Image (tube, rainbow, N blue to C red):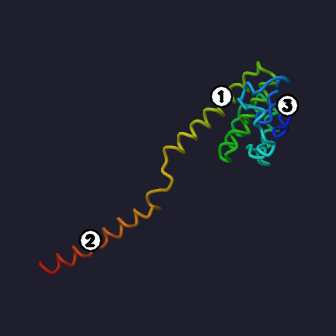
Amino acid sequence: MTDAPGETATSGACPKCGRRRADDAEACPRCGLVFSLWKPDLGATLVRLDQTGEALWRKVQDNWSDGAGHEEFLRHCLQTDTLAAAGRLYRERLDENPKDLLAAQMQSQVLSKAALGLSIHKSQPRTAVTRSRWFWVVVLAAMALGIAGGLFWRRFR
C-alpha cells in the first residue's frame, strides 16, 4: 500500500502520486515531481473522491471483475470532476499488481475520458450565445429596425 498523498517529501513515497521512491531519488519517475520543490500544503489541492465516490470504489474493490461497477464508478467520477482521483486509485492498484489487465484497461479509460473532457472544454465557448450581451444587442436592434420598417412601410403604402 502506498503512503497517503500530502506527506512530506522525505517519506518513502511521492507526495503527489504515491509511488514508492528510492531514498536517493531527486524526482518521481512516474509524475516528475522534484522532491526538493514540494511543499506539504500543496497536498490539499489534490482531487479527492466524495462520499459517493468512496462508496462506489469500495463496491468496485469488493467485486473487482464486475465491469458494470467500474463503469458506474467512472461515470460518477466524470460527473463530479474527480477523474484524477479515480486515475490515482487505478494506478495504485497497478502498482500492487502490475499484471492486472482490468486495472490497466480502466486507467486507460480514465485517461481517455479526461482527455476528451479537456478537448470538449476547450472547444466550447465560455458563455452560450444566448447569454451574451451581444446576442441581446442584435435582438433589440433587429426589433427596432423591424418596428421602424413596419411604420415606414405603413406610412408610404
Q: Residue at x 73, y 32 (%)?
A: 33
* Image coordinates for residue 90, horizontal then vertical, percent: 75, 31
Q: Is residue 71 left or right of residue 154?
A: right
Q: How many marks?
A: 3
Q: Residue at x 73, y 37 (%)?
A: 86
* Image coordinates for residue 89, horizontal then vertical, percent: 77, 34
**Which part of the image, by quadrant, shows the C terminus?**
bottom left
Of the numbered discs in the image, which one, if any, rests on residue 145? 2
* Image coordinates for residue 66, horizontal then vertical, percent: 75, 31
Under circle 3, the secondary element is: loop
The residues bearing labels 1 and 2 have C-alpha atoms spaced at a distance of 55 Å
Q: Residue at x 81, y 38 (%)?
A: 5
Q: Is residue 45 above or below residue 15?
A: below
Q: Which residue is mark 1?
A: 108
**Which part of the image, by quadrant, shows the N terminus?**
top right
Q: Which residue is mark 3?
A: 2
Q: Considering only order in the chain, which callout, 1 or 3, is on the residue closer to the N terminus? A: 3
In the rendered image, the residue lying farthest to the top is 99
Q: Residue type at mark 2?
A: Leu
Q: Considering only order in the chain, which callout, 2 or 1, is on the residue closer to the N terminus? A: 1
Label 3 packing within 10 angstroms: few (<14), some (14-19), many (20+): some
Q: Residue at x 86, y 24 (%)?
A: 23
In front here: 112 or 75?
112
Q: Residue type at mark 3?
A: Thr
